[in-house]
Amino acid sequence: MAGVKDIFYYNTLFYVRTKRFQIMLPLAVLISFINTFLVDFHVVTKPASAFLFTEANLGYSEILFILIASMFAGDLVSRDFSKEGLFILTQPFNREKIFAVKFLSSILAVVLVVLAYLAGSFASTFILYHSIIPTWWEIVGISIVGIISLVSFVSLFSASVKSPTVSITISIFVLLIGFPLVQSIMGDLNKEPFFLVTYALQSITDLAQRVYPPHVVRVLSPTGDSVTYNPTVPESIAIFLAYMLLGIVLCLVIYRKRQLTDV
């Protein structure tokens, strides 16, 4: 157990000392105050309610969460198959424990950045409206579950690709370009993209609305009816848990196989 704790401690220390953490943490806080600056400098009109302002603040969450997960989990496994990670793989611990400890340390790092972003968003709302929306705790909860699912999914690319840079690049491309493209195509077909983690992330901003939007919104027009889908909170959690389970299980399988054949 002492050895496992040491791996967790030094891996967490590694993340905290990296430039990515030292840049992403203040950047997340800065992003959370962007709308406050825009209102204070009269660039945009102050929204009529704390709900609208919070929703606008959280509008950056999807892109930010994807970048955070990709930056911190894109090399979660691939680092172990470089000279840097050979020491860990030669330790007398089973690979499941090593992966679990490294996974938890990356989760700790990303959750700290996410909490900093959310704290800044709610603080900026309080500054302008002297109150925060009552669903703040639900937003925090689903954001944490969402970022863990993203880390689990990104870990798959890290386990499958040898180069940390390539795995980070693939993660960003798939989540920022590939999934939104599929979601757009599904929208054109009036189909619910229930299998996309990016679709589930919409619930974060939906929770910031005064009334949670209906699951299905039908718009009638002369050119043809269109349907827009909003994920329910239980549906979003189910999607997050599915990605979490799939990512962790497959990553463990690949991790064990790679350590037997590549090292």
Image: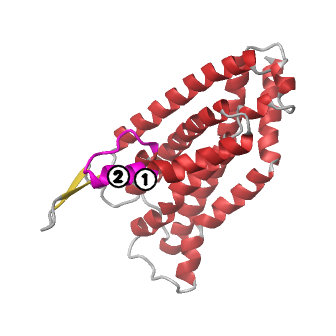
Q: Residue at x 25, y 52 (%)?
A: 214
Expressed as whole percent of the image width and height from the top left, the position of residue 141 reads 49, 43
Q: Give the side of residue 21 with respect to residue 51, left or right.
A: right
189 falls in the magenta region: yes
Question: Whole-Å distance between the Cαs marked 2 and 1?
Answer: 6 Å
Q: Give the side of residue 127 with respect to residue 132, left or right.
A: right
Q: Quadrant of the N terminus?
A: top right
Per the image, label 1 sits on a secondary structure element best described as helix
Per the image, label 2 sits on a secondary structure element best described as helix
Would you name the residue on which mark 2 appears?
Answer: 185
Stretch of the chain drawn in magenta: 180-197
Q: Residue at x 72, y 30 (%)?
A: 102
Would you name the residue on which mark 1 appears?
Answer: 181
Expressed as whole percent of the image width and height from the top left, the position of residue 126 reads 52, 67
Q: Nearer the viewer, residue 78 or 111?
A: 78
* Amino acid at pointer 1: Leu
Q: Nearer the viewer, residue 44 or 151?
A: 151
* Amino acid at pointer 2: Ile
Identify the disc placed on residue 105: none
